């Protein structure tokens, strides 16, 4: 969809009318209500064109929350909801909705253990759900394009107010450019495509996402945004070259800043380019490894940080001694000097020097880069093709554990990589989500906690407002989320 530039005057009237409407209807939500009072109060409902990521570790109740939101919106507010279930088939999904609506144990429903007095309740619940405008697609392994096509058709035929996708990691991005690249880039493509899906029919899209195992390695299991990014991290003293300033700085000194430039590799030309960083952040203290190359390059990174290899991007814990990673070619003073010669006046000043004897070539020593282990076997055409590029493939000499360290990462939106410690590394994948909700249940990890059956919805990212935490009641036997009411009483002894 291509849109022309719009003068602000034509937009202003619509915005002012919307503010006036909200001022006169303070109790009305502009977005699609979730059915949870405090969540709707903080978010104002799910807004049009927003991508909402609901993430958590397995067993936290992501699917249950997604279905609770869909059911609340469709039943209480007559919203038209499309559910794309890549994990469960449509019968299983409807059975879970039926369990919530009838308040009959989901396990008993699966086994057909329904008591005589429960049948009227079950049939009433079935009729109530059948009257809602919930549409379900259970195509396994659906691609982004499949979902977009079906959503467009449904929008044209019935209209849509909310789309729920369960869940992102089961989707295929086979139409993504560079489909042979790693899964991390594919998930990034899926995320961007879901944001486009939200904007196209102008409806909120709720995408469920599974967090990486990094959560389990911490004493505090509450999720962080860095868990959703699923990217690795670099030790705090890793040198980052700032081309605008012509100097190296440790990555920890960049935390909390943005808008500065770094060097990145353009995968279309294999040339070094300046790229703007949108975010620099600390992800805590984690175990790190020291990687050393044959030519003496060193970098400290977590096991899941990605490096550019001849086969594509690979995690550090997937690399092996003897393998090769991309290292930027070091620019000589001569090439840097030549880059400054850009005008005819520069050439006129240079010509007298070129005419002197000082520039005469008196000898030449033939060398072959493969002899130095830089490019590899001469017969390898792919390696030989690197001669006109800004990288070479340095050999890994060692990978060793190096204790714990404060670790950091950068987000480079366009090229998605940067040069750190004179080695090409992958950047953090900045989520395209407008809202990120983490589902966390303390009773899943701590058996004797006093927060039994309480789930925290952590609003970790909210593009339009503040963040915070909303606590809900989680009824395990029904896999249902409800508003939480806490009553405190003073006991007399």
Image (cartoon, rainbow, N blue to C red):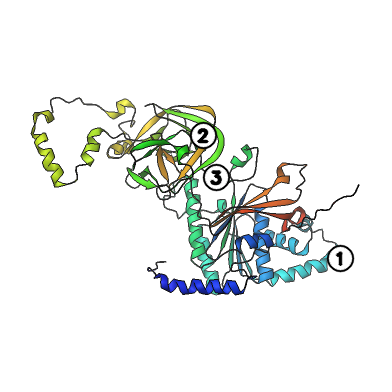
Q: Residue at x 32, y 26 (%)?
A: 372
Describe the element under mark 3 as helix, strand or loop. Answer: helix
Of 117 and 270, nearer the camera is: 270
Q: Which residue is mark 2?
A: 317
Describe the element under mark 1 as helix, strand or loop. Answer: helix
Asked if residue 349 lies left or right of residue 54, the reply is left
Asked if residue 110 lies left or right of residue 55, the reply is right
Asked if residue 302 lies left or right of residue 345, the reply is right
Could you classify mark 2 by the number of other residues whose Cα lies within 10 Å: few (under 14), some (14-19), or many (20 or more)? few
Q: Nearer the viewer, mark 2 or mark 1?
A: 2
User: Horizontal and vertical percent for residue 96?
Assistant: 71, 59
Earlier along the polypeptide chain: callout 2 or callout 1? 1
Residue 117: give its label. 1
Earlier along the polypeptide chain: callout 2 or callout 3? 3
Furthest residue toward right: 493
Q: Residue at x 48, y 37 (%)?
A: 252
Q: Using the image, determine if residue 257 lies above or below residue 485.
A: above
Q: CA distance from mark 1 to mark 3?
A: 50 Å
Residue 226: give its label. 3
Q: Nearer the viewer, mark 1 or mark 3?
A: 3
Q: Is residue 41 visible?
A: yes
Could you classify mark 1 by the number of other residues whose Cα lies within 10 Å: few (under 14), some (14-19), or many (20 or more)? few
Q: Using the image, determine if residue 236 lies above or below residue 189.
A: above
Marks 2 and 1 in Cβ contact (< 8 Å)? no
User: Horizontal and vertical percent for residue 301?
Assistant: 49, 34
User: Horizontal and vertical percent for residue 476?
Assistant: 75, 53
Q: CA distance from mark 2 to mark 3?
A: 19 Å
Q: Is residue 90 visible?
A: no
């Amino acid at each position: 969809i291509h849109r022309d530039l719009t003068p602000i005057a034509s937009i202003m009237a619509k915005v002012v009318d919307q503010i006036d409407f909200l001022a006169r209807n303070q109790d009305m939500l502009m977005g699609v209500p979730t059915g949870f009072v405090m969540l709707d109060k903080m978010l104002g409902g799910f807004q049009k064109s927003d991508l909402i990521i609901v993430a958590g570790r397995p067993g936290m109740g992501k699917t249950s929350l997604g279905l609770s939101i869909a059911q609340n919106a469709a039943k209480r507010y007559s919203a038209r909801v499309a559910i794309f279930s890549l994990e469960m088939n449509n019968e299983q999904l409807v059975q879970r909705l039926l369990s919530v609506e009838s308040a009959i144990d989901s396990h008993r429903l699966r086994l057909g253990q329904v008591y005589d007095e429960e049948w009227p309740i079950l049939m009433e619940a079935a009729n109530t759900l059948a009257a809602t405008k919930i549409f379900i697609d259970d195509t396994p392994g659906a691609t982004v394009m499949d979902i977009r096509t079906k959503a467009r058709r449904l929008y044209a035929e019935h209209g849509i107010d909310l789309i729920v996708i369960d869940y992102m990691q089961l989707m295929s991005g086979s139409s993504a450019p560079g489909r042979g690249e790693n899964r991390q880039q594919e998930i990034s493509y899926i995320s961007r495509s879901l944001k486009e899906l939200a904007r196209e029919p102008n409806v909120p899209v709720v995408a469920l996402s599974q967090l990486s195992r990094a959560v389990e390695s911490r004493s505090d299991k509450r999720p962080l945004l860095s868990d959703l990014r699923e990217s690795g991290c670099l030790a705090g003293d890793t040198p980052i070259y700032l081309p605008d300033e012509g100097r190296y700085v440790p990555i920890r000194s960049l935390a909390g800043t943005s808008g500065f430039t770094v060097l990145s590799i353009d995968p279309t030309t294999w040339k070094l380019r300046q790229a703007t960083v949108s975010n620099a952040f600390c992800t805590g203290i984690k175990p790190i490894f020291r990687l050393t190359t044959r030519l003496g390059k060193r970098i400290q990174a977590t096991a899941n940080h990605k490096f550019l290899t001849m086969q594509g991007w690979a995690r550090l814990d997937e690399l092996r001694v003897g393998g090769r990673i991309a290292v930027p070619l070091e620019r000589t003073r001569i090439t840097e000097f030549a880059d400054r010669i850009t005008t005819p006046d520069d050439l006129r000043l240079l010509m007298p020097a070129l005419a002197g004897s000082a520039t005469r070539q008196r000898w030449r020593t033939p060398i072959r880069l493969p002899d130095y282990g830089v490019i590899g076997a001469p017969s390898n055409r792919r390696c030989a093709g690197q001669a006109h590029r800004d990288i070479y493939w340095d050999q890994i000499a060692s990978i060793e554990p190096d204790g714990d360290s404060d670790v950091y990462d950068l987000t480079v939106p366009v090229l998605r990589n940067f040069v750190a410690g004179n080695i090409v590394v992958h950047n953090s994948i900045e989520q395209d989500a407008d809202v990120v909700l983490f589902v966390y249940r303390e009773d899943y990890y701590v058996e004797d906690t006093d927060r039994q059956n309480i789930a925290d919805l952590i609003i970790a990212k909210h593009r339009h407002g503040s963040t915070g935490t909303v606590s809900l009641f989680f009824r395990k036997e029904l896999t249902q989320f409800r508003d939480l009411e806490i009553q405190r009483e003073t006991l007399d002894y």
